[in-house]
Image: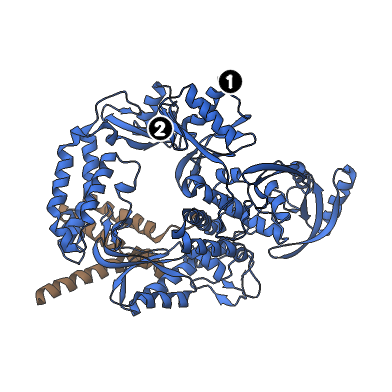
């Protein structure tokens, strides 16, 4: 039993931890931002796995999707 | 009532145990066996000449069939006890590569029963109960490895003395089924005391315990005891503890394994035994070594097909009016309904498995789908009537476990009838079915908020019956509403993302479905479980999120009460299960487990890797952990942290309820 290749979730965790290495030499205000982005990037791991997209592209897409959601929320709150 | 076979023992001479009106009788039968060897004509000719030289074995030319079709070879007869020697000889003659050997490692009892179409615990109708059998539970409690209390059935003896030991001896003599508790060798020690005092009991043989790993977890199998003329079952065995005696009987009935064997093997072995029995009944040869290697495939194909079940990540938060819909035995249903089997996955099949390059043929009945059909149908039957009787519930649990492992076995490297492509086709069809379910639910006005492999949580305003009907029609897999929740909270993981398996939901019937929180765990102290139970009792009264918010003060007061009265709690409420995964000398850090092993070693009490021991932490920093009652103190600071952690899921529900029906944001919760 067992998988031959890592799951999308595992791949994204690996990618996320590699990116987070940057935070060791970042300004503290940027660390919070990058942590938040990492969370956004991993949020849609399961959907990305289903689609068969590349890990890196899926990660970026996931961040964009969550940013779009935040923009929508801001726009709605401004309209309201 | 006719005689019913309840057990079988022996190898070359098989003794069948019959029961009739609670009376046991035995009949003995000669048991002969054979193996089948295939190879090239030249090699088979060489083998037959070698066999002629020895004059030890009878053989004949035979055309048998395996799952793929006819195979030509030699059928060599031998006593079951001599088959391993025969196999060794054939392998040596063939230099380990020239011959394919079949039917060489089948359990002799299973083979005896299957060849004669006999069944353990045979019943005429699935509604019938098992024949009445005298059974007794013998258990009790140990204190640091020494028996301190005995239980025979419902009767508890506070002391281990002549009276209680004499009653144990009588119970063994009066019953056929002995269900015994043998953690810390409890039962063995009791039997030793009985024998020492001169009470007459049947001959006894001890079987040592063992540590094993399954899905990354370390477990310990308690030592077992065989009692001559009795059927002795260890109460800690997985099958007995999960399904009770009726469930164990069902496993024996389905797998053709004697009940004592069925109690000591994994459910995976029970399923493979059932498949072997099905093969024997249908004259299909069982390979000694599996020869179905993974097909060559491109890395792209591997990436596409080597995936597990599909999951959706829930947004952490509190949701109202949610349906949980579950596919019934999804993977076994896929195997049966889509005719999946190693020999039906072909390049020119009629049906293309979505998301894979595999095709399945429907021109012939697949072995695996045929073998599992009866198991699946029976399980779905008992699932539908389990509310009528606990016996049906136990049978349902047993069959459910067998079905669960039937899928995993298709990917296991040593599974006789497994193939990795079948495994991949099953998971692929599972992902496709869940995707179809999400889309159909959406078309009917529902939104999926969470999904795990075969379960989907949806909310919306559509007609749920129509959704189920449409999904079942599309996927050919049964799907039912597992529950409707007045509200359900999906918890965040430490990362902040939604945890897949941490949720609390209140059903319409006032029962909670709880997963992943302290309440469900053994490795947390009783105070946490008590707190969460009381907190849920408050939340049980809340039908809406607004009502939860209205009761926030009650929850806060309860938390304060627990925090303040922590010092006054009974010592037993601080006891927690500590799971030991290795031997003392294998631990490199001074963690709780190592300290526990040290403390138990000093007390002369042996803990095996895989054991879970209840203990109280006296001083975390000082490394003092007490598996007995040696200390009065507890480490309050250590337990306060546990309690705070137990507050978190309850606090999350309350804080989420403030936002009405919408889930709160993670940043708001963690700020």
How many numbered discs, if any? 2
Q: Classify mark 2: residues with Cα within 10 Å, few (<14), some (14-19) or many (20+).
A: some
Query: In this rendering, does residue B298 appear at all?
Result: no
Task: Note whether B87 is above or below B222 in the view shown.
Answer: below
User: Residue drawn 48% across and 30% down?
Assistant: B186
Q: In this view, does B51 lie to the left or right of B82?
A: right
Q: Is residue A17 left or right of residue B6?
A: left
Name the element at disc 1: loop
Task: Note whether B362 is above or below B122 in the view shown.
Answer: below
The residue indicated by pointer 1 is: B198
Q: Which mark is residue B438?
A: none
- As rendered, which of A37 and B237 lies closer to the eye? B237
Which one is in front in this view, the residue at disc 2 or the one at disc 1? Answer: 1
- As rendered, which of B430 and A20 lies closer to the eye? B430
Quick one: which chain is blue?
B
Q: Do labels 2 and 1 share a chain?
A: yes
Residue B293: % across, % down: 62, 59
In the image, farthest residue toward the top: B197
Mark 1 chain: B
Residue B291: % across, % down: 66, 57
Chain A in the picture: what colour? Answer: brown
Residue B45: % across, % down: 86, 54
Task: Note whether B171 is above or below B493 in the view shown.
Answer: above
Name the element at disc 2: loop
Q: In which quarter of the image is residue B129?
A: bottom right
How far apart, in angstroms, are the residues tagged by discs 2 and 1? 43 Å
- As rendered, which of B16 and B87 lies closer to the eye? B16
Pointer 2 or 1: first along the chain: 1
The residue indicated by pointer 2 is: B587
Task: Note whether B534 is above or below B160 in the view shown.
Answer: below
Mark 2 chain: B
């Amino acid at each position: 039993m067992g998988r031959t290749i890592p799951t999308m979730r595992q791949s994204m965790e690996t990618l996320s931890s590699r990116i987070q290495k940057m935070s060791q030499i970042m300004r503290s205000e940027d660390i919070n931002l990058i942590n938040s982005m990492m969370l956004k990037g991993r949020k849609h791991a399961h959907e990305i796995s289903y689609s068969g997209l590349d890990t890196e592209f899926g990660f970026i897409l996931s961040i964009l999707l969550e940013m779009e959601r935040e923009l929508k929320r801001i726009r709605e709150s401004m309209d309201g | 009532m006719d005689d019913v076979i309840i057990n079988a023992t022996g190898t070359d001479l098989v003794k069948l145990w019959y029961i009739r009106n609670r009376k046991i009788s035995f009949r003995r039968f000669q048991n002969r066996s054979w193996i089948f060897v295939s190879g090239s004509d030249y090699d088979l000719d060489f083998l037959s000449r070698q066999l002629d030289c020895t004059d030890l074995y009878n053989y004949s030319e035979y055309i048998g069939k395996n799952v793929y079709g006819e195979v030509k070879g030699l059928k060599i007869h031998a006593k079951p006890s001599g088959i391993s020697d025969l196999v060794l000889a054939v392998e040596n003659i063939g230099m380990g590569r020239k011959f394919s050997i079949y039917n060489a490692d089948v359990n002799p009892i299973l083979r005896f029963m299957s060849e004669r179409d006999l069944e353990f615990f045979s019943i005429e109708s699935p509604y019938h109960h098992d024949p009445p059998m005298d059974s007794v539970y013998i258990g009790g409690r140990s204190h640091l490895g020494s028996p301190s209390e005995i239980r025979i059935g419902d009767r508890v003896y506070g002391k281990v003395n002549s009276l209680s030991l004499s009653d144990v001896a009588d119970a063994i003599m009066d019953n056929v089924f002995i269900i015994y508790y043998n953690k810390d060798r409890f039962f063995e020690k009791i039997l030793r005391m009985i024998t020492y005092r001169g009470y007459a009991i049947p001959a006894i043989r001890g079987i040592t315990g063992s540590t094993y790993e399954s899905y990354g977890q370390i477990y310990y199998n308690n030592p077992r005891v065989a009692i001559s003329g009795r059927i002795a079952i260890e109460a800690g065995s997985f099958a007995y503890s999960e399904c009770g005696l009726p469930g164990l009987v069902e496993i024996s009935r389905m797998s053709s394994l004697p009940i004592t064997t069925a109690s000591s093997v994994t459910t995976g072995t029970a399923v493979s035994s059932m498949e072997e029995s099905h093969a024997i009944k249908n004259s299909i040869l069982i390979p000694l070594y599996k020869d179905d290697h993974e097909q060559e495939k491109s890395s792209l194909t591997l990436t596409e097909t080597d995936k597990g079940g599909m999951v959706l990540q829930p947004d952490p938060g509190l949701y109202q009016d949610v349906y949980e819909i579950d596919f019934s035995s999804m993977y076994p249903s896929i195997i049966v309904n889509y005719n999946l089997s190693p020999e039906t996955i072909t390049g020119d099949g009629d049906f293309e498995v979505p998301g894979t390059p595999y095709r399945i043929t429907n021109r012939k009945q697949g072995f695996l789908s045929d073998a599992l059909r009866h198991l699946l149908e029976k399980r779905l039957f008992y699932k539908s009537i389990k509310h009528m009787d606990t016996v049906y519930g136990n049978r349902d649990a047993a069959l459910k476990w067998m079905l669960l492992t039937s899928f995993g076995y298709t990917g296991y490297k040593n599974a006789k009838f497994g193939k990795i492509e079948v495994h991949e086709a099953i998971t692929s069809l599972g992902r496709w079915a869940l995707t179809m379910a999400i889309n159909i639910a959406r078309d009917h006005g529902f939104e999926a908020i969470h999904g795990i492999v075969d379960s989907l949580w949806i909310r919306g305003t559509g007609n749920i019956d129509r959704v189920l009907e449409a999904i079942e029609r599309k996927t050919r897999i049964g799907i039912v509403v597992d529950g409707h929740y007045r509200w359900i909270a999906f918890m965040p993981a430490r990362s902040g993302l939604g945890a897949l398996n941490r949720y609390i939901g209140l059903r319409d019937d006032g029962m909670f479905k709880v997963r992943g929180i302290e309440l469900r765990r053994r490795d947390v102290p009783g105070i946490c479980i008590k707190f969460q139970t009381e907190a849920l009792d408050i939340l049980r009264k809340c039908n809406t999120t607004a009502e939860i918010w209205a009761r926030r003060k009650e929850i806060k007061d309860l938390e304060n009460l627990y925090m303040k009265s922590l010092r006054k709690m009974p010592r037993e409420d601080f006891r927690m299960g500590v799971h030991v995964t290795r031997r003392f000398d294998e631990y490199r850090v001074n963690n709780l487990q190592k300290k526990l092993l040290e403390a138990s070693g000093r007390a002369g009490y042996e803990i095996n890797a895989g054991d879970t021991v209840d203990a109280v932490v006296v001083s975390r920093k000082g490394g003092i952990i007490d598996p007995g009652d040696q200390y009065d103190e507890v480490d309050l600071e250590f337990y306060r942290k546990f309690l705070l952690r137990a507050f978190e899921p309850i606090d999350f529900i309350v804080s989420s309820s403030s936002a009405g029906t919408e889930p709160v944001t993670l940043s708001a919760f963690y700020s």
